[in-house]
Amino acid sequence: MPRRRTRALAAGLLALLAAAGCDRAPAPPAAAESATARERLGLMTSLPLYWPLGAGVEEIASGRAPPPWQRTALEAGYVLEPLDTLSPIPGLAADAPATDPLAGLTRLAVIQPRGLSPADNVALDEWVREGGRLLLVLDPALTGEYDLPLGDPRRPADSALIPPVVARWGLAVRFDEAQGDGVNERALGEAALPLIVAGEVSITNSAAAACTLLADGAAARCRVGKGEVTLIADAALFEHPELAGEGGAGLRALVAGVLG
């Protein structure tokens, strides 16, 4: 499936629902209050965290595609806002203002992205420096199984491309191919961080940001301007339900510990 703007996908889904006569009933007051109480969380990822792997637009619109377990776990604490770009989107008309996908967001999770454009790197750096809290997960070697051929655009990025903004924050990620492939659990704050074939984070420029290595070097936390970045060099927790605890409780606890 070609990469599309999230808003365009949402519009397509609504059109299909209307055409099929499947107008959605208004949410009950309790559900509306619950959504209001939860914090907004922007989500950019190539992993099937929000939509099921390989699901088509019609299947999603008809409700036949169940939400992934990761989405269910995260939506217990957040209102997710899927993003496919971080930089401003030009208006449709020449005199129309650009739309900022990060406007109003204070929390953002970028998990194994396909790659950030130069404009995305700039927008992300500015957003963090203005007070945003970012969870950035960059795995050099995914360990999940995805039933899609190599080259299929729906397949997650098997190896993360390290965006230049990571170096701007004084960090680097390396990968040791000789390491074992067993599960290695480390602590990240009060949460458990299970790792499988993880990358190693290092501080390359201590003057760029106030960074501290965590989880024995598999993660780092940096104070950047008014904001905060937590970089994790492994995505196993977001791939394997058996590592995430019952109902994804471990995943939810880690994200809440990082982003609040």
Image: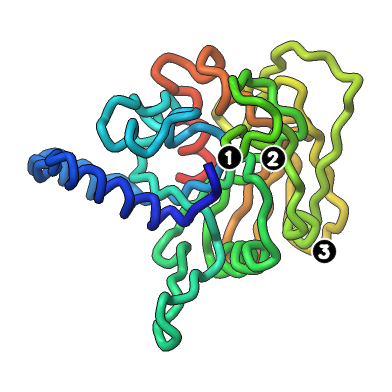
Say whether disc 1 or disc 2 marks the residue closer to the N-terminus: 1
Say whether disc 1 or disc 3 marks the residue closer to the N-terminus: 1
| Secondary element type, mark 2 | loop
- The answer to which of 44 and 91 lies nearer the viewer is 91
Position of residue 28 measured from the top left corner of the image (x, y, whole percent): 8, 40
- The answer to which of 256 and 234 lies nearer the viewer is 234
Quarter residue 79 falls in: top left
- The answer to which of 227 and 127 lies nearer the viewer is 127
For the question of whether residue 37 can be seen, the reply is no
- Amino acid tagged 3: Ala
Mark 3 or mark 2, whichever is nearer to me: 2
Which residue does the image show at 75% across and 46% down from the upper left? 161
Residue of label 3: 207
Residue of label 1: 46
The crowding category of the residue bearing disc 2, from other C-alpha atoms within 10 Å (few below 14, some 14 to 19, many at least 20), is many
Mark 1 or mark 3, whichever is nearer to me: 1
| In the image, residue 27 above or below residue 125 | above
| Secondary element type, mark 1 | loop
Quarter residue 142 falls in: top right
The crowding category of the residue bearing disc 1, from other C-alpha atoms within 10 Å (few below 14, some 14 to 19, many at least 20), is many
Say whether disc 3 or disc 2 marks the residue closer to the N-terminus: 2
| In the image, residue 51 above or below residue 223 | above
- Amino acid tagged 2: Leu
74 on left or right of 141: left
Which residue does the image show at 43% across and 76% down from the upper left? 91
Position of residue 75 measured from the top left corner of the image (x, y, whole percent): 35, 36
The crowding category of the residue bearing disc 3, from other C-alpha atoms within 10 Å (few below 14, some 14 to 19, many at least 20), is few
Residue of label 2: 138
Mark 1 or mark 2, whichever is nearer to me: 1
